[in-house]
Image (tube, rainbow, N blue to C red):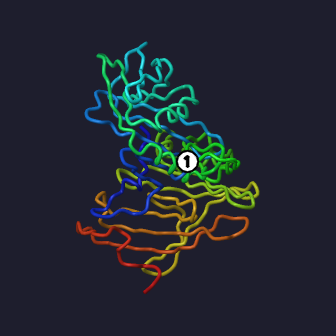
């Protein structure tokens, strides 16, 4: 299973900092990454009996396919079929051989990338889905379809597809919008100039391996004047803090991006951030550096991307700090004492 985005999971007692777009619509959930890859996930009805998740996953960008992903608690029997039935009527049969297996957690991704859209079309007007399968013994898992259409509409909205010809629900004549933000999940997706920063052992980020990099929610943002901003996991942050490094490529030149911060001694800058969240519509970057795993202390910083031609430049909007790890935190880090702006 794709690792959950660090910040979305960082609940602070009764409050939580801002997270990437997520929404529960009745029995269907949509969860999106910083790079706006979104999973539409169905909720199991009753006991899972082996299958515990069905997701339709789509990356941002024009005409991207919708991947069908099924997750199981055990290995599905070789050569067996999965039979999909909507409202009791068989609508699709797939052999296990039609899936790519990610063996670490029995995640099955359909090889035919057209199946996700096809299945959504079959399910959006139905009320229930069952999948019969064999995993040692024959099993059957029921999924609720309540909220599927609304979830598809929300995913279209988040990815900027409303009224576009590649939308899931509200399809129109508009041409798909260009890709402005995307996930970076492998070293191979980095520009050649940036790869040594992560692949060379002696580099600052060379302590992170490709698997950890994949699960680190790194992303890239395309800015005006052919500038690209990269926010990428860098080194191992331990159980609850993931550090990120920021780079830009402008006019073909690579450079680090500094972030302004406020300290007890006055203004300063930093070359990285921890547990980041990116809001694409507002071009806002949030970082929550936990003092401990409970998240009842630490630092919350919020930056806004400046309109600065030819470069990625940020302004510090807000900084909050709580040094005492006392188990208190009603309201979340957004209520901690302000370090900036000064009152």
Q: Circle 1 is placed at which residue position?
A: 202
Among the 4 quarters of the image, the one containing residue 290: bottom left
Q: Residue at x 57, y 73 (%)?
A: 315
Q: Residue at x 51, y 27 (%)?
A: 110
- Residue 320's x, y, as percent? 40, 74
Is 132 placed above or below 279 here? Answer: above
Taking depth in this image into account, of 127 and 204 the one nearest to the observer is: 127
Question: Pointer 1: residues within 10 angstroms few (<14), some, or many (20+)?
Answer: few
- Residue 233's x, y, as percent? 50, 51
Among the 4 quarters of the image, the one containing residue 102: top left
Q: Residue at x 50, y 51 (%)?
A: 154
Is 257 placed above or below 336 here? Answer: above
Taking depth in this image into account, of 258 and 98 the one nearest to the observer is: 98
Is 247 placed above or below 109 here? Answer: below
Q: Residue at x 74, y 57 (%)?
A: 226
Q: Secondary structure at mark 1?
A: loop
Taking depth in this image into account, of 240 and 193 the one nearest to the observer is: 240
- Residue 173's x, y, as percent? 69, 47
Among the 4 quarters of the image, the one containing residue 335: bottom left
- Residue 23's x, y, as percent? 42, 53
Q: Identify the image quadrant of the C terminus.
A: bottom left
Q: Residue furthest top?
A: 79
Residue 266 falls left or right of residue 246: left
């Amino acid at each position: 299973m794709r690792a959950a985005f660090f910040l979305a999971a960082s609940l602070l007692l009764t409050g939580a900092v801002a997270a990437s777009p997520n929404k529960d619509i009745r029995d269907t959930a949509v969860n999106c990454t910083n790079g706006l890859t979104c999973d539409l996930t169905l909720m199991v009805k009753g006991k899972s009996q082996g299958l515990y998740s069905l997701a339709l996953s789509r990356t941002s960008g024009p005409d991207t396919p919708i991947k069908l992903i099924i997750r199981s608690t055990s290995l599905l029997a070789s050569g067996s079929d999965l039979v999909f039935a909507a409202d009791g009527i068989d609508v699709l049969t797939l052999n296990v051989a039609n899936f790519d297996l990610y063996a670490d957690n029995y995640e099955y991704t359909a090889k035919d990338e057209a199946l996700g859209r096809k299945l959504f079309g079959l399910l959006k007007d139905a009320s229930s889905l069952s999948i019969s399968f064999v995993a040692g013994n024959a099993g059957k898992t029921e999924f609720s379809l309540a909220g599927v259409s609304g979830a598809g509409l929300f995913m279209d909205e988040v990815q900027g597809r409303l009224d576009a010809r590649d939308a899931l629900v509200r399809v129109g004549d508009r041409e798909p919008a260009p890709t402005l933000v995307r996930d970076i999940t492998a070293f191979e997706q980095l520009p050649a100039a940036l790869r040594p920063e992560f692949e060379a052992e002696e580099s600052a980020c060379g302590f992170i391996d490709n698997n950890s990099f994949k699960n680190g929610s790194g992303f890239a943002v395309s800015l005006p004047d052919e500038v690209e901003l990269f926010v990428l996991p860098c080194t191992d942050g331990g159980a609850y803090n993931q550090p990120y490094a920021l780079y830009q490529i402008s006019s073909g030149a690579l450079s680090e991006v500094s972030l302004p911060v406020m300290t007890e001694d006055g203004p300063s800058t930093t070359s990285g951030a921890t547990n980041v969240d990116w809001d694409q519509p507002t071009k806002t970057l949030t970082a929550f550096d936990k003092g401990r795993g409970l998240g009842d202390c630490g630092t919350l910083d919020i930056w806004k991307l400046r309109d600065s031609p030819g470069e990625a430049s940020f302004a510090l909007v807000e900084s909050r700090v709580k040094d005492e790890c006392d188990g208190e935190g009603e309201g979340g880090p957004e209520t901690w004492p302000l370090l900036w702006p000064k009152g």
